[in-house]
Amino acid sequence: MHSFRMARTVKWQVRAFILVFLIDATICQIRYSVPEEMRKGSFVGNVAEDLGIDAKRLKSGGARIVISDSSEYIRLDVDKGNLVVGERIDREQLCGQTSPCSLNLEMIMTNPIQLHSVVVEVLDVNDNAPAFQEKEMHLEILESALPGTEILQVSATDPDVGINALHGYTIHPKTHFNIKVSSSPNGHKYAQLYLSEPLDREKEGKLLLTLTAVDGGEPQRSGTLKIHVTVRDTNDNAPVFMQSIFKASVKENVPGGTLVVSLSATDADEGINGHVTYHFNRMSGNVAELFHLDENTGDLTVTGIIDYEENKLYEIGVQAKDQGGQSTSTNVIIEVIDVNDNPPLITLTSFSNAIAEDSPSGTTVAIINVKDLDSGKNGKVDCSVNSNIPFVIHSSLKNYYTLVTNGVLDRERNPVYNITFSAVDEGSPPLSTNKTITLRIADVNDNAPIFEQSYYEASVMENNSPGLSVFSVKARDSDSGQNARVSYLLIDTELNGSPISTYISVNAESGVIQALRSFDYEQIKTIHIFVKGQDGGSPPLSSNTTVRINIEDQNDNSPQVLYPVQTGGSLVAEMVPRSADVGYLVTKVVAVDVDSGQNAWLSYKLQKATDRALFEVGLQNGEIRTIRQVTDKDAVKQRLTVIVEDNGQPSRSATVIVNVVVADSFPEVLSEFTELTHDKEYNDNLTFYLVLALAVVSFLFITCLVVIISVKIYRWRQSRILYHSNLPVIPYYPPRYSDTLGTGTLPHVYNYEVCRTTDSRKSDCKFGRAGSQNVLIMDPSCTGTMQRIQSEKSILDEPDSPLEVRTLT
């Protein structure tokens, strides 16, 4: 075979057909033909010469051959500019029965880029001989068979094409038999063996025929089939098929055992000569694996898997034989009907797994490709996505679909979308395929922080320690990441003329509100602040809330006595006539507490008294009344100590001394009070000299000076709190008490004229007319009497003074 190929190669003259198309002077096409089976390195054509290109240009331009299937049947010799055979080419393996058989090559050069199309047609060489499926066959024929009786139908196959393909058949010897060559609908030739002359079993009982199939190649090749013919006695009727050609159809993927067609042939003979059997006559090997022919019934059934996508038509030769040796043949053509057995195939070609929530409508998200291997309606596909999502698909190209946005995206409502593509074909029943992708929505700062409450209210006890955590606010942001990180800021306002930031601070991370100073309820009762919550987005978004901080009162102030006023030099006394009855109102202690609530609830108690059996104090109103009839045995001078307590925890208190004079007239008690005031004057002079002596010492002087300043400041602050506080003051003035019905404490008011000398320790008192004053103010000193009285009168006449005293002229 190899020497034959070499000889054939020498005889071949390589023909080159050049067809050059110039496309912008960069693209050309050239066509060659080369026989198959040429040895490696055999010359195909000179590309450089045929294209008019210098061979050096091929090398400098880096010319190379590109083949679509990556095979190396043809390669380029760059040095010579020749196309040569790269490896042995078998046309039958490469193209089968397809003619012409061509190799499409691309020759590419650079600097500048040039693209040349090279088509190499592989010419068939008669390297395959026709071959029968069997080497020998055994036939039986009745001697009574008539000339023209068809005995056998057989065919050979030749992989070559064209003139080298199967050309015809010959038979030897031709004494009794001859052949008729016919063609099937697909152009395949087969031989029909028939009886040409009558047989005589007595002369010749066995015959050997040689059927030769020849092709049209040069040299001609052939294949033979030995046919052993046995002549039997008298069976003069051959089976006859009901149809010359049987046509049937079968659906693909039918189960095994499905009946395709029932073949039927009849024989006019009786007995064993009339029994017909059925056999495959001619078919390819793969058909035998797909179909089964029942020898006795002629039923053709399916045994394998029939796939429409692999083969759409089957042609099978069937022979009917009787037991006398006669037979007849027919063709069965089976058409395969497509069944919708292939679901659509979805391929994701492009996909972005995240998209910003502010993406405009129409933004492309993904591109898919949808295919269906079925044909007709079974291959038509409709694609859709799940409903109730802001996405739709559009068909951009054939079998391609684009997924785009179709609405507003909101990450806070739907951070993730599971989008399902559904592809459904139009078959019956329809097949479908689903493919799900997960799309994440990227956050955009489109939500401002929201406080849990638009208005907060908190409380803090006064006298708190600086840095105390009062309250905390909390705001939430629906965004994520940095966009949801909330910082808390205190909005600048003023309180009592000072920035609010000097009173309150807000922790930027936690929102905890802290007091920067100690609060005094008597000065500040309520603080309103405004807190801003701001996220970390760009640009940042914010919202505000209001916080009201109520300062709670603490019992940190003692009661203050408004009446009777405790003076340093003058002695204030209430006078009670000896004729006073039980329940006589002596005076009323008036006190206030600058605290609030129960811390300001006051109660009055009698702590000390000269005669506890004579006086009592009202627990709630502070009124001092007699609890028995005054007698002559009662002392003229009565000293009462009243304690005033608030209701706080712990409670605070203040004491006041009330001097009471039991007498019917002023001269009666004047001497007693004079001795009392002279003793007090003596003690005051002693204290003065002692202080003057100690003041000599510098250190003690400085100490006393600091103490005096501190006391002054304290009294000034107490007076400010007393006179400028909002607490109610009971407008009660006992010195001017009068009873219009004549049952009051002092039904008669007297005026006194007092004359004092500068040297005498005795004073004269002159009884005067009745007046409207029952409070006796006496100055123990002997000098400056009228001036002191006048100054005290001016103090008491002030509108803010808790006590008004009218002096004598």
Image (cartoon, grey):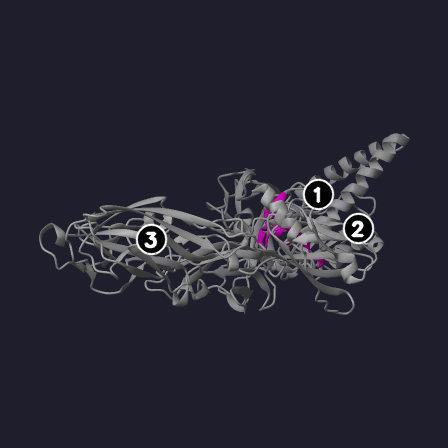
Q: CA distance from mark 1 to mark 3?
A: 164 Å
Residue range (magenta):
469-494
- Of tags 1 and 2, the one toward the viewer is 2
In the rendering, at what x and y percent does residue 76 appear? 73, 50
The secondary structure type at the circle numbered 3 is strand
According to the image, label 2 marks what residue? 80
Q: CA distance from mark 3 to mark 2?
A: 52 Å
Label 3 packing within 10 angstroms: few (<14), some (14-19), many (20+): many
The disc placed on residue 282 is 3
Which secondary structure, mark 1?
helix
Q: Residue at x 58, y 56 (%)?
A: 351
Disc 1 crowd rating (10 Å Cα; few below 14, some 14-19, many 20+) is some
- Which amino acid, mark 2? Lys
Q: Amino acid at mark 1?
A: Thr
Residue ID for mark 1: 674
Horizontal side, residue 157 vs residue 566: left or right: left
- Measured as percent of width and height from the top left, residue 344 is found at 43, 59
* Image quarter of the C terminus: bottom right
Mark 3 residue type: Arg
- The reply to whether dot 1 and dot 3 touch (C-beta < 8 Å) is no
Task: State which mark lies toward you, 1 or 3.
Answer: 3
Q: Nearer the viewer, mark 3 or mark 2?
A: 3
Residue 735 among those drawn in magenta: no
- In the image, is 438 to the left or to the right of 447? left
Q: In the image, 674: left or right of 147?
A: right
Q: Earlier in the sequence, mark 1 or mark 2?
A: 2
Of residues 418 and 65, the one nearer the viewer is 65
Image quarter in which the N terminus is found: top right
Which residue does the image show at 55% across and 64% down from the upper left?
402
The foreground one among 98 and 677 is 98
